[in-house]
Amino acid sequence: FSWFPIQEVAKLFAGIFVTIIPTIAILRAGTEGALASVVRLVTTVDGEPVNAMYFWATGLLSSFLDNAPTYLVFFNTAGGDPEILTGPLATTLLAISAGAVFMGANTYIGNAPNFMVRAIAEESGVRMPSFFGYMAWSGLVLLPLFALVTLIWFV
């Protein structure tokens, strides 16, 4: 047994959560902030959410961050009000949740267990695909499924 994989994941999480705080503040500025393009990407001109874009934008970020901070970012981008997001905007919350959870599987770093399993396997002498090799395999399998999820639930 080795603590190395767990230490790697702990360092990754610490970095993510330290950098997520200013990101949320910037996104809260909405269309007037530095990340106005992200806000415009996931909302219509009338301010209504574009659920398919919430799914894909959350998923893209979740592919390279862990799903918890990604969920936090887009939950706040969608207004951050649990009452509204579990009521009239429930499909938006579903898009954010599904994107954060499903697309974390796209890369080794998108979900802490992916990263930890890779580290444990390599430490045990199991040959694992490279970062981009893993992305290629996961993309071949998962992207068509994500397109189907988009069509069924968010369009």
Image (cartoon, rainbow, N blue to C red):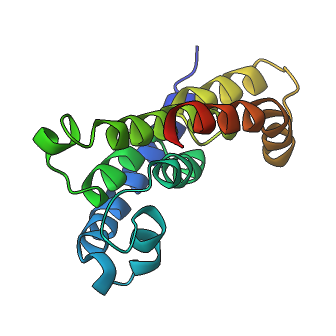
- Against 65, residue 67 (above or below) is above
Frontmost residue, 9 versus 23: 23
Q: Is residue 7 among the parts visible in the rendering?
A: no
In this rendering, position of residue 21 left or right of residue 87 = right
How many numbered marks, from 0 up?
0
Residue extending furthest left? 83
- Against 132, residue 103 (above or below) is above
* Residue 125 image offset from top left, x and y in percent: 84, 21
In this rendering, position of residue 154 left or right of residue 86 = right
Frontmost residue, 65 versus 96: 96
The image quadrant where one finds the N terminus is: top right
The image quadrant where one finds the C terminus is: top right
Q: Residue drawn 32% across and 80% down? A: 31
Frontmost residue, 22 versus 127: 22
Q: Residue drawn 54% across and 35% down? A: 111
Q: Residue drawn 33% across and 39% down? A: 93
* Residue 102 image offset from top left, x and y in percent: 56, 31
Frontmost residue, 30 versus 118: 30
Residue 86: name its quadrant. Answer: top left
* Residue 17 image offset from top left, x and y in percent: 34, 53
Q: Residue drawn 59% across and 52% down? A: 60
Q: Is residue 99 among the parts visible in the rendering?
A: yes
In this rendering, position of residue 66 left or right of residue 33 = right
In this rendering, position of residue 35 left or right of residue 142 = left
